[in-house]
Structures are given as C-alpha cells and as structure tokens.
Amino acid sequence: GPVWKAIAEQAEAKIDRHPPLHLALIAHAFGKVAVRDEAFLCGPLADAALENLSGFREKHLACLLDGFALAGCYREDLFRQAMDAYILLGRIGGRRRQQMMARVAISATLEAPELIAGAPPSWQA
C-alpha cells in the first residue's frame, strides 16, 4: 500500500546511514506484513545489507533473512553470504530464532531451490 511505499522511499533515501540492526528490522517489517517491494528489498536494502554484513549479529541476520523470505525476495548473493555469516557466528539462539531460521531454510527450499542446490555441508548441520 501507499504507507509501505512511503516507508520504502524514506528508508532508501537514508539507506547508507542505517546500521545493521535497522536494515534487519526494515527487512523483517516488510516481510511480516507481506509487502513484496522487490525493487526496494532486492535492490538498495539488499545492497546495504551486503555492504554491512560484517556488522550483523546472529539475531540481526536471522531477522534479515526471515524478512526477505517472508517477502519472497531471494537474492542469491545476499542469501548465501548472510547464511554463511550466520553459521560462522556459531550461535543458534533460542526457540524463536530457531523457528525463524527453519522458516528461512524451508521457504528457500520450496521457493528458490537453486539457493540450496550445491550448498556447503555447514548449511546442513
């Protein structure tokens, strides 16, 4: 709707100033309300997330990936790098985070199986 279009425009105008937490929460918010603004999500938001990937903590990565999965936005470079970063951090978190990451994995397997094909063994652990 028009409200989410305005939010996307405001977020994009300041995309270079958002820290990883904000990027993750923006993605998660769009996903939770099922707004599929691919131009924004798979474009500037994904680009900013990739540029700041080293600043994301486990919880941020889970929110980022879950938001993109809920919005149906699967950008291969972001998905693979964010998954690798999440695994490297080594903490699976509590039940809620585990559920989010399970939703990410299942959604990607069903909606974008090419992302899972050839995945490293670390993704299967």
Image: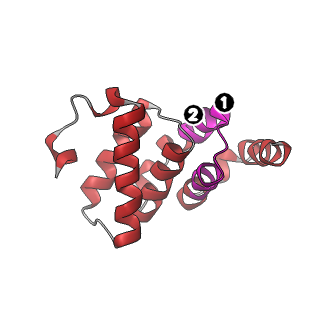
Magenta span: predominant SS is helix
Q: Is residue 29 magenta?
A: yes
Q: Which residue is drawn at 25% across and 54% down?
A: 88
Horizontal and vertical percent position of residue 116: 28, 34
In this picture, is 25 found above or below 77?
below
In this picture, is 110 found above or below 31?
above
Horizontal and vertical percent position of residue 14: 73, 47
Quarter occupied by residue 2 = top right
Cβ–Cβ below 8 Å for labels 1 and 2? yes
The boundaries of the magenta stretch are 25-47
Q: Which residue is drawn at 67% across and 43% down?
A: 35
Residues under labels 1 and 2: Cα distance? 6 Å
Residue kind at label 2, given as amino acid type: Cys
What residue is shown with label 2? 42
Quarter occupied by residue 118 = top left
Q: Does the magenta stretch include residue 92?
A: no
Residue kind at label 1, given as amino acid type: Ala
Q: How crowded is mark 2: few (under 14 residues within 10 Å), some or many (20 or more)?
A: some
Looking at the picture, tell me which residue is in the foreground, 6 or 13. 6
Horizontal and vertical percent position of residue 106: 35, 45
What residue is shown with label 1? 39
Residue 59 is tagged as: none
Q: Residue at x 35, y 71 (%)?
A: 95
Q: Residues within 10 Å of mark 1 (few under 14, many from 20)?
A: few
Looking at the picture, tell me which residue is in the foreground, 23 or 100. 100
Check disc 1 and report its element: helix, strand or loop: helix
Q: Residue at x 37, y 55 (%)?
A: 101
Horizontal and vertical percent position of residue 23: 58, 53
